[in-house]
């Protein structure tokens, strides 16, 4: 699969919004919906089929549509997303003007919903006014559409389920092979009313679901993919598993994968626009979906996901278990490029195609394994060459079920296999042509739409189509001395031999020391250990608990009070004291605390005539006084309610330790977030003492307030 320069969207340029969008796509439209459903709206989101979003038309503005603006351009209807009592829903607000305005969910390109013939549309809704009637319709490619249908089932303020038969819609004019709205609806009487929509779902019949095959169609039915039994081993003689993704997590792991984004043809005159939204994890599988969908100047969308800069490999074995899409112009690929691609370009970087398939014309039973290089290597003019082989299934197509596509890289040879059956090999000489294949590569999974090799979609191509990956695993030679990730450390000495950014993983958790916040795995962060003066790379060196450090003498104690007046000086004495175990960084395992309830009065004196006024220790200046038996307070730390050492303590140096009957003034300098109060807790470290617990110690904290 030839390449050109591209935009990349990965963890280093990735913002939180993308991560959220990927996560929502996985949760809302993967795991929570039944396989026989297609979502229009549910859980406070719109299904991915309706890529143009939510819109309305309004008679008052000449039936012009307002898209994704909450009705700002439509004077007779507004909508908004709400959550109440655990339910997320969309509220349609009608002002009672009797002017026709309808809300609808729009796809940029008509969809073939033939599989829903005989099924139903389910609507869960309620209305602010009882006995509210709905009118609906469903549009196909304009001017196609059903007539207006006034539903006999009525709404009231309680949630109700309304069902609409798809066959009835077809009888009323719907072209089921060209649907471009999930639903159009409005209150029949156009009265003053709010209508809440919790979900709208197209549901196929059980018989229709049972007949679905392959990875294409409006919904993916994993249970209908043939269980061919094709799977790879979890280990091989002489090899060790060093990296893999079983896709059992709820969202794509952006520490291992990132995305290519764009639609410029990708060097092959391809027609799709690559975007992250088309990749998701569904029931333990990575699913890449090619859709008919308009983005920028493209009529198709898909995803291209890769491990560039995250995971790279040289010699070893790659196993990928996947089920493929089908159709004229569909081009799925499981492949790899040299890790130096951005520096030297294609084909100098080398390319290894583990699996490619071109759909249509009866070609869905054949896959290809190929290598591409530049004749003469890096220092020669452009001279692309490729060699490869093909594998034909004995029966059926690669879209029917799962198969394992494998590639084995060795210094002098590359081999390709399907379901552990070798079908092609290529020997590498010492010529500079093949230098690229002695360097690390990264993985790429994608589905292209169109291109010079497969040709382009036609009327026979059904969308959406999907590449479904069950897992990917990489094994390397247990005794090999190569440097698979090219980081300068040979594999036997590299804790993470496929991560070019990391070489050490002290605690063996799969996260390199540079990224790991707890390198030695002792439960204490590296930052905390640095503060405590312990070794963050030694699991036996960590902040000791009081029992560990003193044989029972409590070194740290917790002072807390839940209420202290926020406007005036207040003194609270005696405090609540708790002996604490664990460590001093907010993870203290303290005795149960009893809160002090201090009635508030403006004069600062305690009063029982008024109800307590809630307030907490806040940032400011305090005076600490203590009666300490034989102890002295050597250090004080203030933590916020999240256990972070965020306030900065000033003017309490080691020279200002508090001894018997003394007091000291200190200041908590860091301002509260957004001007809000926070709940501070004070941790005191004691020195000295006779070896007995400081049970009789008393303290008082006085906050000194300054008028602005």
Image: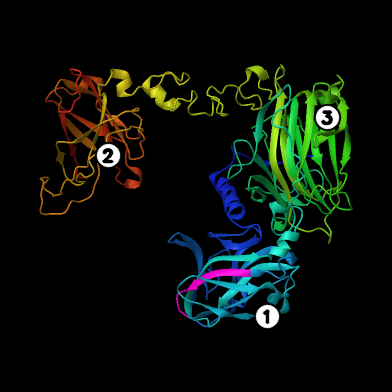
Q: Secondary structure at mark 3?
A: strand
The correct choice, above or below, for 216 with respect to 528 in the image is: below
Q: Seen in the image, is 166 located left or right of residue 629?
A: right
Q: Is tag 2's residue or tag 1's residue first in the polypeptide sequence?
A: 1
Q: Tell me the distance, in whole angstroms, between the alpha carbons under discs 2 and 3.
A: 67 Å
Crowding at dot 2, Cα within 10 Å, few <14 / some 14-19 / many 20+, comes out as many
Q: The N terminus lies in which quarter of the figure?
A: top right
The correct choice, above or below, for 114 with respect to 268 in the image is: below
Q: Which residue in the structure is indicated by mark 3?
A: 415
Name the residue rendered at 28%, 18% in the picture.
550
- Proximity of marks 2 and 3: CB atoms separated by less than 8 Å: no
Q: Tell me the distance, in whole angstroms, between the alpha carbons under discs 2 and 1.
A: 66 Å
Q: Secondary structure at mark 1?
A: loop
Q: Is tag 2's residue or tag 3's residue first in the polypeptide sequence?
A: 3
Name the residue rendered at 70%, 28% in the picture.
235
Q: Seen in the image, is 149 located left or right of residue 449?
A: left
In the foreground, 293 or 409: 409
Asked if residue 145 can be seen in this view, the reply is no
User: Percent from the top left, x then y, of residue 107?
Assistant: 67, 63
Q: Any magenta on residue 123?
A: yes
Q: Which residue in the structure is indicated by mark 1?
A: 147
The correct choice, above or below, for 365 with respect to 174 in the image is: above
Q: How is the image coloured?
A: rainbow
Q: Any magenta on residue 371?
A: no
Labels 2, 1: front one: 1
Q: Which residue in the structure is indicated by mark 2?
A: 619
Name the residue rendered at 60%, 25% in the picture.
502
Q: Tell me the distance, in whole angstroms, between the alpha carbons under discs 3 and 1.
A: 60 Å
In the foreground, 669 or 544: 544
User: Percent from the top left, x then y, of residue 544?
Assistant: 35, 22
Which residues make up the magenta segment? 121-130
Place residue 540 in its image quadrant.
top left
């Amino acid at each position: 699969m030839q390449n050109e320069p591209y935009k990349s969207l990965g963890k280093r340029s990735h913002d939180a919004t993308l991560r959220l969008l990927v996560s929502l796509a996985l949760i809302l439209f993967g795991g929570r919906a039944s396989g026989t459903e297609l979502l229009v709206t549910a859980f406070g989101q719109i299904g991915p089929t309706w890529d143009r979003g939510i819109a309305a038309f309004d008679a008052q503005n000449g039936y012009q549509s307002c898209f994704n603006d909450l009705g700002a351009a439509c004077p007779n209807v507004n909508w908004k997303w709400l959550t109440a009592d655990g339910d997320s829903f969309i509220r349609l607000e009608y002002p009672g003007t009797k002017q026709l305005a309808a809300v609808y969910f729009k796809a940029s390109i008509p969809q073939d919903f033939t599989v829903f013939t005989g099924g139903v549309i389910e609507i869960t809704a309620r209305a602010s006014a009882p006995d509210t009637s709905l009118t609906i319709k469903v549009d196909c490619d304009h001017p196609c559409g059903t007539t207006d249908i006034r539903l006999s089932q009525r709404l009231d303020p309680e949630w109700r389920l309304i069902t609409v038969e798809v066959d009835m819609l077809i009888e009323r004019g719907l072209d089921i092979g060209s649907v471009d709205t999930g639903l159009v609806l409005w209150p029949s009487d156009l009265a003053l009313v709010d209508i809440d929509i919790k979900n709208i779902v197209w549901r196929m019949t059980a018989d229709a679901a049972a007949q679905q095959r392959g990875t294409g169609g409006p919904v993916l039915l994993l249970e209908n993919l043939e269980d061919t039994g094709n799977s790879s081993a979890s280990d091989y003689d002489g090899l060790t598993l060093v990296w893999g993704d079983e896709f059992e997590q709820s969202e794509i792991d952006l520490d291992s994968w990132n995305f290519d984004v764009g639609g410029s043809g990708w060097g092959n005159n391809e027609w799709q626009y690559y975007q992250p939204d088309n990749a998701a994890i569904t029931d333990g599988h990575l699913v890449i979906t090619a859709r008919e969908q308009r983005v920028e100047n493209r009529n198709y969308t898909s995803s291209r996901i890769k491990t560039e800069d995250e995971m790279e490999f040289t010699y070893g074995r790659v196993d990928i278990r996947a089920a493929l899409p089908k159709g004229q112009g569909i081009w799925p690929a499981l492949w790899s490029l040299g890790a130096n691609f951005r520096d030297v370009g294609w084909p100098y970087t080398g390319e290894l195609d583990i699996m490619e398939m071109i759909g249509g014309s009866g070609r869905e039973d054949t896959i290809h394994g190929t290598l591409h290089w530049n004749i003469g290597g890096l220092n020669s003019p452009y001279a692309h060459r490729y060699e490869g082989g093909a594998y034909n299934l004995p029966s059926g197509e690669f879209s029917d079920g799962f198969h394992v596509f494998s590639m084995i890289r060795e210094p002098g040879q590359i081999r390709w296999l399907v379901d552990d059956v070798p079908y092609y090999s290529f020997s590498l000489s010492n010529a500079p042509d093949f230098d690229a294949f002695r360097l690390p590569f990264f993985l790429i999974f994608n589905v292209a739409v169109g291109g010079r090799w497969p040709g382009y979609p036609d009327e026979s191509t059904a969308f959406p189509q999907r590449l479904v990956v069950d897992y990917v695993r990489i094994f390397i030679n247990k005794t090999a001395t190569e440097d698979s990730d090219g980081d300068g450390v040979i594999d036997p000495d590299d804790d993470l031999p496929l991560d070019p950014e990391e070489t050490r993983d002290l605690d063996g958790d799969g996260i390199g020391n540079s990224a790991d916040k707890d390198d030695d795995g002792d439960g204490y962060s590296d930052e905390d250990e640095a503060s405590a003066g312990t070794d963050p790379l030694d699991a036996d060196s960590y902040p000791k608990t009081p029992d560990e450090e003193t044989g029972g003498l409590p070194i740290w104690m917790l002072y807390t009070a839940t209420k202290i007046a926020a406007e005036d000086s207040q003194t609270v004495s005696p405090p609540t004291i708790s002996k604490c175990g664990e460590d001093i960084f907010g993870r203290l395992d303290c005795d149960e605390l009893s809160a002090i309830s201090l009635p508030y009065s403006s004069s600062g004196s305690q009063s029982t005539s008024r109800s307590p006024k809630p307030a907490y220790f806040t940032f400011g200046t305090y005076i600490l006084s203590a009666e300490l038996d034989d102890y002295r307070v050597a250090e004080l730390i203030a933590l916020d309610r999240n256990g972070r050492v965020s306030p900065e303590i000033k003017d309490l140096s080691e020279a200002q330790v508090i001894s018997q009957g003394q007091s000291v003034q200190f200041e908590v300098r860091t301002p509260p977030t957004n001007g809000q109060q926070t709940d501070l807790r004070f941790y005191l470290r004691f020195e000295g003492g006779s070896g007995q617990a400081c049970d009789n110690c008393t303290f008082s904290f006085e906050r000194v307030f300054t008028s602005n």
